[in-house]
Every structure is written in C-alpha cells, then in structure tokens.
Amino acid sequence: MTATQWPTGLLILGTLFHAIYLLSIFDIYFKSPVVHDIPAVDVMHESYPPPAKRLVIFIADGCRADTFFDATDRYAVFAHSRLREANLTSLIHSQFQDDEPTRAPFLRHVIKHVGSWGVSHTGCSRPGHVAMFAGMYEDVSAVTRGWQENPVDFDSIFNQRFPDIVPMFAKNVEHVHEKHYSSADEDFAKDATVLDTWVYHKVQALLDDAKSNRTLFNQLQANQVVFFLHFLGIDSNGHAHRPHSREYISNVALVDRLVEGIHTMLEAHGSGFAMDVPSHSHDQVFDQLKAHTVPEADALRLWNLTSFVRKDVLQADIAPLAAALLGLPYPRNSVGVLPFSYMEQGLYRARAVVFNAKSLFVHASIRQQLKQNATWSIFFRGFPRLDRCLGQFATIERAFGAKAYGDIEAISQRIIGDALAGLRHFQRYDWLLLMAIITLGYLGWMLVLYVAVARWPFTGLSLVQHDDRTWDMGTVTSVCVGSGLLFVYNHQATSMYYLYLVFPLVFWRFLLRERQFLVRPCHQKYAVTPNLDLFYAD
C-alpha cells in the first residue's frame, strides 16, 4: 500500500468516533443521582421527642460473615498479644465470655440478650459509607476521582442542622470534629491492628478530656450527637495477609474487645449509645458483613441465632433510621426506606414513616419537575403513580385522628414504593434515546467500513462529498434537523448529546446515498482482475 493509499483520514475519524462514544457511558450509566435544592423533611416535633439522644456507629471494615460467626476462639491469643502491646490488658478477657467458644463474645451477647439484629445488604461492591450516612448509593460519577472523593457535595446525617473515610463527611461542616491517622500509617507491610487501637485511644482521650473541659462535656451530653468510629484494621489485614490468615482472624477478635471497651467507657461517661454498625448496641444491631464461603444458614446456626427475629435492611436504609432515632431531617438525596420494625410502634414511629414517604415523594417530584422543565410537553413522559400520592397523604392525615398507626404505615409504604419507582424512571429517563443513538452510530460505522473496503480508495471526506467532490447538502440538512429535534426533546441536553447524534446522522446519510451499492448482489460489487506475470528469458 502506497503512502497515498494509507487511510489516515478514516483512522482519525474512527479513533475520534470511538473516543466520543466511549464517554457515553458517563451519560448513561455514570450519571450523578444528586439533586440540589431539595427541601429537608424534618421528623422532629416537640410533642413527640425522638427515642435516642446520641448515636454511636462502629464500622468494622472488611469483616466477613464466616469469620465473624465462626464458633471458635482460634487465634484469639494473638489479639490478646496486640492488646498488651497497646497497653490495653484490661480488655483481654471479656466479661461476656461463656462456655460457648466465639471470637466475638461481646457482640454475640448484645445480639442474643440486649438488642435487635439484622444484616445490611450492600448496593455496590465499593465502600458503603456514603450509602449508610447519606442514604444514597455511591455517586457513580465519582469513578473519575476515585472512591475517596465525590465530584459533587451530598447531604448526610452529619451535616444536618477516611484518612479515606472520616474526612469525607467532615468536609466543610463546622460542627463536625474528626481525627484520622495519616495515609502513611496504612502500611500493608505492617500489622494493621494498630489502626484500630489508635481509634480506641482517641476515644479514651476524648472522654478523659471531657472530665476537665466543661464545654466538651456539654457537647458530648447534648442531643443529636453522632459518634462515628471506623475500624480499618480488619480490611487492611485481609488485603495484606488474606482473609484466612492469623492476622485477619485475630483482628476480628480484637475489634470485639475494643467495641466492648468503648461501650464501657461511654456507659461510665453517661452517654450511652443507640446504634452500633456493623455489630451491636442497646437498641439495634446491624452486621455489615462481606461475602463468605459458608452458607449463611450454617453461619447463623453456629451462634444459635435461628430462633431470633432477624431484621435485614438495605445499606441505604441505615441513614433514615439514624436520622429517625435522633430526630434529624432525612438526608435530602436519600433513597433509603426507614426500617421501622427497629422502633417501638406509636405516634413517633408513624410520623417517622410518613416523613420518610414525604421526603422520597418530594425528591421524586423535584426530579419530575426538572425533567418536565427541560422537555416540551408533547414529548414529556411523566410518572402517573406520583400524582396519586397526593390523595394518599390526605388519607394519612385523617388516619392520624383515629390513631390507626398500622394503616398509616401501610399507606406510607405504598407511597415509598411509588416514589422509588419514580426516581428510577427519571434517573433512566434518557436511556432509551441515548442507547438508540449509540446503537445506530455503531451499526452505521460498521456499514461505512464495509463500503470503504469494497470501494477502496476511500477517504473521510467521502462521507460528506459526492463522487464529483461536491458537498452533500443533505448531510448538513440532516445534522441541522436532528439537532433541532434533540433541542425540542430536551433543551437542556449537554453538548455531548449533540456529538453522539452527529455520527449516526452523517453515517446513515452516507449509507442512504450508497443504498444502491449496498443492495446490489455481491458478485456485482467486486471486479477481480487476475495478475499477469511475464517472464523473459535471454
């Protein structure tokens, strides 16, 4: 192939086409779910105070169910050794250790004798802290920045009225106080239990300071206080030494002792605590456990939990529960459903469920309004089930007069189902259009390559020019008309939408001009000229 025959223009066009279409995944699948300017829905009211004053959340990152529920104290001696090294010998022996061997005696005691329990199911494989505290599954658009940072601000239970996790929620929130170790301390070559004992020592120092600092003491004794304690050692040791290693298994036992020790300190301080994630508390218990190798039923049987009522939740449901327990407004972009079975039935619980339904309905209504404002009415596809919710709210208000709390919760659950369906509808509103454009673009490109090979030589300009090198005004007309229709359909469409549309319009306009060639029988498309080799002999 000579230099003049090299398909430079076609290669450049193909590279540009695939690069732009690769970006379409961000407009289809990685579109941020965050909506701004959503009004807060507050569950607090003077006539029905919340059931909890303070909330303590423990997160044991990377804890597996088969290791957590294992009915053995194997490798616990190594946890004891780490506690001695951290000058925490008083935590070695748990007062809740009984004849049944287990590496988590305190947490098992809370599950079986003190609190409710359940397993929270994740919505994604990435860290679920955003889901637990903001009530929304992680902003998928954060894929471009890594999981430690989100490109948009989101609402969480911490900003109402990490080195990787904790700062994510303390950012730009004045009333949040955080301490975290440096990223240099997260060394997979070292024993990661020091990360967990570091947390314990910081809590101990905080409570000790409160004894001599009246301002700090009053802050800790105030209402609506949230303690968030993140234990990263289990996850780090799992990555460094594998999940069945001595280091990983002993770290699970160590976290159980640390949680028991912090519980004792808080009780002595007079703070108490309302919830413990992912293990246990006075009122409710969640096990945030990763995939495991043994069947779930077998794991629960090891702890004799089959006779206890299990109250599972989705990961995003923890945020509205935390807000309801403290009387905080629900996070504005939360899609969590309040697991009200963890609360005592009555007026407050009924109000909390109604406000959960109202917050999701407001969220879905604003999404509908935003999409309606961007679309001409003749093209707008609404969600009729949202319109029916207004009448159901009126029914709920009448039911409060009769104290029919069961009926109120049932109606609210129907509204929540409709609101969540509406949110999914408007989150995926442009999927059909974009997928159709992308599909037509790829099909058109494949047929263009077929024509280019069959009618070689071929240049990129052949797409917009006739054989006599005159410009095809039909292509310009197609692009203008298509762009105009897209603007009518969605006048807030980004520039990328128009770029996606240009390629199939140009490709299929060219294929329309070449329709006679495409439908011609195959044996008429190619003219084969046999080579003639001449040999001369002297």
Image: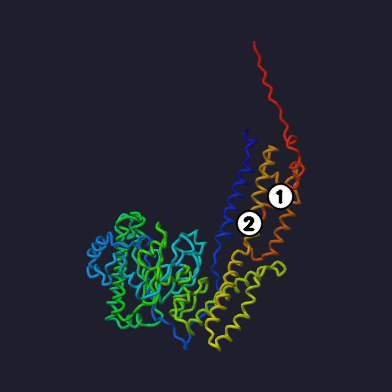
Q: What amino acid is at disc 2? A: Met
- In the image, residue 38 lies at what x, y percent? 55, 75
What residue sits right under mark 2 in the picture? 435
Crowding at mark 1 (Cα within 10 Å: few <14, some 14-19, many 20+):
many
Colour basis: rainbow
Q: Circle 1 — which element?
A: helix
The structure residue drawn at horizontal position 48% and vertical position 74%, both measured from the top left corner, is 339
- In the image, residue 68 lies at what x, y percent? 35, 63
Q: What amino acid is at disc 1? A: Trp
What residue sits right under mark 1 in the picture? 508
Name the one closer to the observer, 381 or 218. 381
- In the image, residue 34 lies at what x, y percent? 54, 68
Q: Circle 2 — which element?
A: helix
- In the image, residue 513 lies at what x, y percent? 76, 46
The structure residue drawn at horizontal position 30% and vertical position 65%, both measured from the top left corner, is 102
In this rendering, is residue 305 above or below 294? Answer: below
**Quadrant in the picture for the C terminus:** top right
